[in-house]
C-alpha cells in the first residue's frame, strides 16, 4: 500500500477505533445507570458511536483494499492493532468518571467533526456531516450533566472534580499533531489544525 494510503488508513482506524471502544465502554452501563433515563441515554449514545465507528471502519477497509470488512476490523484484530485514544478505553470506575470522559470526548469530537465536514475527501465530509448531528446532541447532554452535577451536592461536586482531574491528562492525545495527522491534513483529506 502506498504511504499516503497507509497514513489515511491509520487515520481512519483512529477515528473508527475511538468511537468503537467508547461505544463498548458506554454499553457496559446498560441496565446499570443511576436512573432509567440515564441508562437509556448512555445506551443510545453508545449506539450512535457504534454507527459512526462502522462508517469510519468501512471506509478504512476500502482504503486498505485487502478485502476485509468493518466487522473483521472491529473484531479480528489483536488489541495492539487498535488505534483508539487511550482515554476511551479506561475502565468505567463510577458514573462521574463516565460523564466527564464523555464530556471531554464530546467537546473534542464535535469540533473535529465540524472541521472534517470541510474535507477535500467527499467521503470523510459525508461521514462527518452525519456524525456531527449526533455529536451536537451528545455535547449538549454531557456538558449539561457535568455542570448540573458539578453545581449539585458537595459529594457530586467532589466526584466530578476528581474525575476531571484524573481524565484531564488524557485529553492531549485527542489533539495531537503527529506525522499521521499532518500527512492526512497535507493531502487535503481534512482541514484540521495540526
Image (cartoon, rainbow, N blue to C red):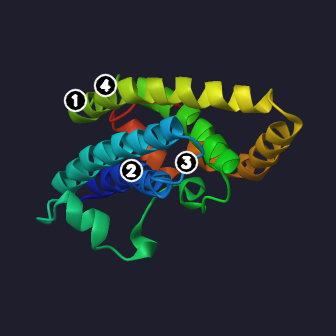
Q: Nearer the viewer, mark 2 or mark 3?
A: 3
Tell me, yes or no, if residue 191 can be seen here.
Answer: no
Disc 1 target residue: 122
Whichever of labels 2 and 3 marks the residue nearer the N terminus, that label is 2
Image location (x, y in percent) of residue 65: 14, 60
- In the displayed structure, 173 sits above or below 66; it is above
Whether label 2 touches label 3, CB < 8 Å: no
Q: Which mark is residue 129?
A: 4
Measure how far apart labels 2 and 3 are at the Cα level: 33 Å
The answer to which of marks 1 and 3 sits earlier in the sequence is 3
Number of the front mark, 3 or 4: 3
Q: Residues within 10 Å of mark 3 (few under 14, many from 20)?
A: some
- Could you give the CA–CA distance between mark 3 and mark 4, rounded to whole angstroms? 30 Å
Which residue does the image show at 29% across and 69% down from the upper left?
75
Give the number of the disc on residue 11: 2
| Label 3 vs 4, first from the N-terminus | 3
Q: Are marks 2 and 1 in contact (CB under 8 Å)?
A: no
x then y, percent, for residue 172: 66, 46
Amino acid at each position: 500500500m502506498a504511504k499516503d494510503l497507509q497514513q489515511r488508513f491509520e487515520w481512519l482506524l483512529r477515528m473508527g477505533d475511538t468511537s468503537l471502544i467508547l461505544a463498548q465502554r458506554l454499553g457496559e452501563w446498560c441496565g446499570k445507570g443511576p436512573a432509567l433515563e440515564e441508562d437509556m441515554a448512555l445506551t443510545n449514545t453508545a449506539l450512535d458511536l457504534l454507527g459512526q465507528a462502522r462508517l469510519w471502519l468501512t471506509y478504512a477497509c476500502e482504503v486498505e483494499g485487502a478485502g476485509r470488512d468493518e466487522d473483521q476490523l472491529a473484531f479480528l484484530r489483536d488489541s495492539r492493532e487498535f488505534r483508539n485514544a487511550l482515554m476511551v478505553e479506561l475502565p468505567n470506575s463510577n458514573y462521574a468518571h463516565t460523564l466527564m470522559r464523555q464530556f471531554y470526548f464530546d467537546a473534542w469530537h464535535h469540533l473535529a467533526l465540524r472541521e472534517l465536514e470541510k474535507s477535500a475527501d467527499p467521503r470523510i465530509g459525508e461521514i462527518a456531516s452525519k456524525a456531527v448531528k449526533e455529536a451536537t446532541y451528545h455535547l449538549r447532554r454531557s456538558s449539561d450533566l457535568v455542570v448540573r452535577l458539578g453545581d449539585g451536592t458537595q459529594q457530586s461536586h467532589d466526584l466530578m472534580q476528581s474525575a476531571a482531574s484524573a481524565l484531564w491528562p488524557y485529553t492531549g492525545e485527542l489533539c495531537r499533531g503527529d506525522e499521521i495527522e499532518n500527512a492526512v491534513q497535507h493531502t487535503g483529506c481534512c482541514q484540521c489544525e495540526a
